[in-house]
Structure formats: C-alpha cells, structure tokens
Amino acid sequence: MSDTDQSSTAGSTPDSVFVIVGAGQAGGEIAGELRKQGYTGRVLLIGEEEQIPYKRPPLSKGFLSGAVTEESLYVSPRAKLEQLKIEFMGSTRVARIDRARHVLVLADGREQPYDKLALTTGGRARMLNQPGTDKSNVLPLRSIADVKKLQPRCFAGQRALVIGGGFIGLETAAVMVKLGLQVTVLEGLPRVLARVTAPEISSFFERMHREAGVDLRTGAQIESYETEGDRVCAVKLADGSRIETDFIIVGIGVVPNVELASEAGITVDNGIVVDEYARTNDPDIVAAGDCSNHPSNFAGRRIRLESVQNAMEQGRIAARSMLGKNEAYQNVPWFWSDQYDLKLQMVGLSQGHDQLVLRGDPATQRNFAAFYLKAGKLIAADTVSRPGEFMLAKKWVAEGAVLPPEQLADDSQPLKNLQAAA
C-alpha cells in the first residue's frame, strides 16, 4: 500500500525525530513501544489536551462519579514518560502537515520537523445540530475537561437528559441515577445498543435501567428544544410529550478526526486508511486507534474500531512499522461496558449471524451469555457478569470454533466441558 518499502530502519538514527500527533491511548502506546523496540532517537508526543495520555473508558464511570482520581486515568505516570525520554507537548494543535518538507506546522506558526510521523488523532463527540443545541448546558462526554464541566451539575435532584442509548449514554445514566439525579434517556432507535447487540440483550439493559429509576424512552424523536437565555430548559418530542431538564448529555457517537490527514493528501475513508501494518499511503506516516480504518481478516472487510484494545494493539504495530519491523495487525475485536453492578463483555462482530443461542435467561437473571453463530461457527459473544465464560468465548471466536447449540445453551453444565470443533 505504501509508496515505498519500509523494510529498512531508515530514519531511526539516534538524532532522528519520531513525532506522534494525538496524545491518547494509541499515541501513548506508540511512544512506549518505540522505546521497547530499542529506538534511541527523539520521541515527541503532541496533544491538543493538556493531559498526558489517559484512559477514556473510566470517564463515564468512576471518574464522573468521583470514585477515581485524574492521576489514576493516566496510561503511564509523568515520571515514566520522563524516564523513557518521551517529550510531551500538550495544549498544542497541529495546523498542517507539510509532507514534502517532513514538517508539522503548529497552530501558533512554529514548525516541527519529523523523520517518521504517527497520526493518532482519535475522534470527537458527535454533537447535535438542531436549533438551540449550541447552548452551554448541552454537553459531550469524551474528555477529562468534559467531565469536569459535568461534575458540578451532578448532584441529587438535578434533571439530566441523556440523548443516545449507546455505551456512553447508558453508563452515564447509571452513574447519575446512583448520585440521585432524575435521569431521562432518549434513544431514537426502537431499542438501546441496537447497533451492537441482539434484541434480548437490549431488553435486559432497558429493564435494568428502568428498575434503577431511569426514565428510558426508545423510538424517541425530538421535535424541538426550548431555550431560556444560554441554556436548554426542555425538549418536546414528536409524540407531544415535553421533558424539562437542567442539562443535556449528548452520547450519539464519535466523529473520527481525519481533517489533518485529509488536507495533507493522505487517503481518508471513514477514518485514515491504513494497510495491515498501520501504514498510510505516505511511507513515512502511520496511523492507529479510533481515527484509523484498517483491513480486518476477522471481519473480511475494512473496519474502524473505537476501543482501547484496538488503540493499544494497533499502536504497537504502528510503532514497529515506524522502525521498519513490519508485522501484520490481526485482531479479534472485543469491548466492555460497566453499568451498575453489571459487566457486559463482548467479543467478535455479530452482524450477519443466523442463530442466537442464550445461556441463562436475561428475562429473569442478572448474569447470562449470548452466542452468535453463522453456519454453525461462533462469530461473536456477549456475556453479562460471566468473566470466565467470556474468556472461553474469546478463544473460540478467535479460532472460529464450531459449537453444538444445544450444549452452548445448557446452563447446567460448565461451559469449559464443551468440546469445540475448529
């Protein structure tokens, strides 16, 4: 895919400069991996946020609730970055990539040369664009700064309106209702988590939230936003109902940050297009994490994944490619979500399954598993509070195991006793 072969370690001399634009999980992983692989030149990590690389999943859970500190989110302590001689340049925006000169032009006009460049620009929260949604109390939840804006609003009695019934929306709702807020969740589709799981699992989580006190409405279409000064005070739905609110959290997905790459002539298509080695169409530029679109042998197509696991594993591959050590990225996607005392763990991609096998009863139990089969082969699994069964499912999905549905469904027998045929 790249214009030239990267099998050499050109550019990785002690006086070379490897720059990473985007100081998230993938960026931090690349920086650390370069050192692990023995790179002795300069490593410069540039981020628009002031914080060093941190983990985003706890933002909508422990960090929002106040149960964990900001420092506990950091991928590596600042002292570790200094020990590894990883330079961090925060609160800095890159305005342009001059590929011909191998130079980054920063927003303040400064220039930063590079020998190899990694783009780990991540994504930004997708926001609403209807009239009135630009008010100060309509907030995303994507960064530490976002959560710090939310926390002062999260106290008992406040009326919170969450738009979006995906992971972020449901996790946030679970935290806020436990803090004593009055929480309403609006999902435009007929069920929550519709893009990632089966109706039975959606129904389970809808029930869990309603039992916890969340006013969860599916198939909800917002007709208009009522405003007072610089805030939204209520929304009116298409069914005529009106919901008063003190603030709104928007959880309707992520937009990949591809503008910097696109303007530099790097191929973009639902993310920055890379090959199996995380290389772009520029031989000296790699990309990884939420912003990248990569070929997946497992999915049989190109995919863009928004997950910590993808950021970390692809980040390591990208670092090795910067050093000319080409290793193909082969992964089986997996995800998780914590809501109340429930841990949802998912492996594989369930789209295209022709059989769903339930182990346990989501209508009556708080722990169960769901297995997605295609032509007898296990292609994905969702488990709720069954970590041991999730580990087995990860192994079987990676192997493409063929499993007897009746034995998968038999909750009276340990899953580990089941014999899989690859």
Image (cartoon, grey):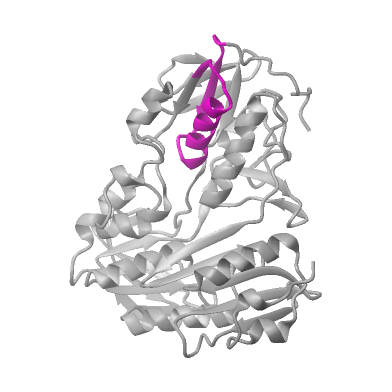
Q: Name the residue rendered at 48%, 41% in the picture.
A: 25
Q: How many marks?
A: 0
Looking at this view, name the residue that lies furthest to the top: 15
Q: Name the residue rendered at 63%, 87% in the picture.
A: 410
The span shown in magenta is 14-42
Quarter of the image where the C terminus is located: bottom right
Q: Quadrant of residue 207?
A: bottom left
Quarter of the image where the N terminus is located: top right
User: In the picture provided, is 1 more to the left or to the right than 60?
Assistant: right
In x, y percent, where is residue 367? Answer: 48, 80
Q: Quadrant of residue 34?
A: top right
Q: Quadrant of residue 328?
A: top right
User: In the picture provided, is 30 more to the left or to the right than 177?
Assistant: right
Asked if residue 335 is positioned above or below residue 311 in the image, the reply reads below
Instruction: For residue 404, say whether it is visible.
Output: yes
Q: Nearer the viewer, residue 352 or 72?
A: 72
Asked if residue 191 is positioned above or below residue 323 in the image, the reply reads below
Instruction: For residue 91, say whether it is visible.
Output: no
